Amino acid sequence: LEAVMCRSLISVDWQGYLYDCDFNQMLDLPAAMPGLIGRDRPHLRNLLQTTSLEGNAIATRDHCYACTAGQGSSCGGSLIE
């Protein structure tokens, strides 16, 4: 799954909230950012408090099958070529 978009980008909405991908943004599934105190919804400003998002959990649901099949929005990833 190295090539699916949620592994290498962050989507940001107009208010500055962070999502793993554009699909999760549309479904209002915020990105995970451990260590946020009193907040479960990370904001762009929270990126100043971390050195890396690598290893954070990625919100997944049934819509993720589209990307693993290489059919996601601007997705170049798939399980097989």
Image: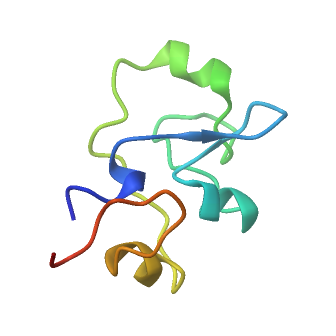
Front-most of 16 and 78? 78
Give the residue displayed 62% in from the left and 55% down from the top.
22
Front-most of 81 and 47? 81
Q: State left or right for residue 50 relative to residue 55.
A: right
Q: Quadrant of residue 58?
A: bottom left
Give the farthest residue toward the top: 48
Q: Residue 17: x and y, percent? A: 72, 38
Give the residue displayed 51% in from the left and 80% down from the top.
61
Give the residue displayed 66% in from the left and 48% down from the top.
40
Q: How is the image coloured?
A: rainbow
Q: State left or right for residue 9 relative to residue 3.
A: right
Examine the rendered structure and indicate whether residue 5 appears above or below residue 10: below
Give the farthest residue toward the right: 15
Q: Residue 36: x and y, percent? A: 57, 35
Q: Quadrant of the N terminus?
A: bottom left
Examine the rendered structure and indicate whether residue 71 appears above or below residue 62: above
Q: Quadrant of the C terminus?
A: bottom left
Front-most of 49 and 62? 62
The image shows a total of numbered marks equal to 0
Examine the rendered structure and indicate whether residue 34 appears above or below residue 52: below
Give the residue displayed 40% in from the left and 53% down from the top.
5
Give the farthest residue toward the left: 80
Front-most of 44 and 33? 44
Q: Quadrant of residue 12?
A: top right
